[in-house]
Amino acid sequence: MLIISFMLALDLGVFHKDDHVVTFKESMMWTCIWVAVAAIFGGLIYFFGEYIHGVDSLEELMTINAKHGHGLKIDPLIGLEENLQHYRSALTLEYFTGYVIEEALSIDNIFVMIMIFMSFGIEQKYYHRVLFWGIIGAIVLRFTFIFLSAALIQRFAWVLAVFGGILVISGGKMLFAKDEDEKIDPDNHPVVRFASKHFRLLKGWTGHDFFVKKDGKRYITTLFLVLLVIEFSDILFAVDSIPAIFSVTQDPYIVFFSNIFAIMGLRSLFFMLSNVMNMFCRLKTGLGFLLAFIGVKMLLHTFCEIEISTPVSLLVILGIIALSILASILFPKKKEIA
């Protein structure tokens, strides 16, 4: 959490104090920084992973292994240190697999965010401010969701089957969704209707502030309304992404770290992809197959005791993403004639 807090403070307090349009070059630089930070953290897990749960004996290692379903074969004959290295390696692979899953699913989230900003007519120079506070809210919400889900899984094994079913359904919806289904109506969105009913809304405000005072009364602005819509959208996306990572590991800390480091880089990825989103027109289909694969994996594990290993899962996930990007390049959507 110290790393996360430091990077967020550095991001907003030093590099983005003033509202401005984030350039492609700037977003590329920050995307590389966030990927590097995530990779460094993965390296820390590889060398010091046992400190996450304070494992310092074979008995504790066997307990954690059984509790979080790492699937390691603990061999008392080879000693603690060698078993710990297998454990660290397993945690590292789970972390990076979860990170790749979350990054891939974040791309679909980015497309929705772009439509939200465009639908509400928000100026580009305010995008970073909204996304920054949106990330803060997402961290809190996902922390709660992850550890509640982990507690449920520990108590009720069938919760994994429920997660698997949700992912298969979500994957199917993504595969067969039409472009018209994703359009956002800024007047009839449920969050807008709720906010209009319970708060004073100052329509037409185009400034930096989330709240303004007028005639002695405090109003929320369109910018804050967009922040609420993005937070609501993130909750919906978390219903897919968090169960997807639980298919890789049931260790809540690994799920949290892989999820949060991907989310932290979401803003820079947003600005990097916003100018080239048409190049990934087939990615949504790939993400549909990805969710369906992960859902089937969880169902097979629960009902048939068939285990698809983490290395195989990672290869399949990377293959799906690569093929969908290749398909986007080879078979781009035809431009509509006005």
Image (spheres, rainbow, N blue to C red):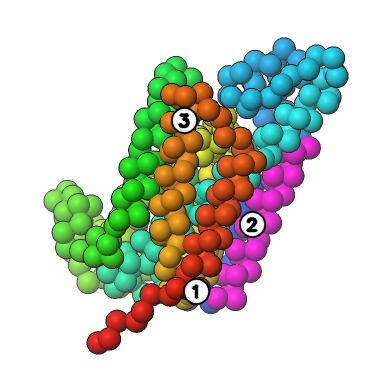
Q: Is residue 290 above or below residue 130?
A: above
Q: Secondary structure at mark 2?
A: helix
Q: Which residue is mark 1?
A: 330
- Dividing the picture into quadrants, the one containing residue 278 is bottom left
Select label 3 or label 2 by which is in front. Answer: 3
Q: Which amino acid does the dot numbered 2 rest on?
A: Val
Density class for disc 1 (Cα within 10 Å; few <14, some 14-19, many ≥20) is few
Q: Percent from the top left, x then y, of residue 102?
A: 51, 49
Q: Which residue is mark 3?
A: 300
Q: Secondary structure at mark 1?
A: helix
Q: Residue furthest left?
A: 197
Q: Earlier in the sequence, mark 3 or mark 1?
A: 3
Residue drawn at x 44%, y 54% as measured from the top left = 287
Q: Quadrant of the N terminus?
A: top right
Magenta-drawn segment: 24-47
Q: Please tell me whether the stretch drawn in magenta is mainly helix, strand or loop.
A: helix
Q: Which residue is mark 2?
A: 35
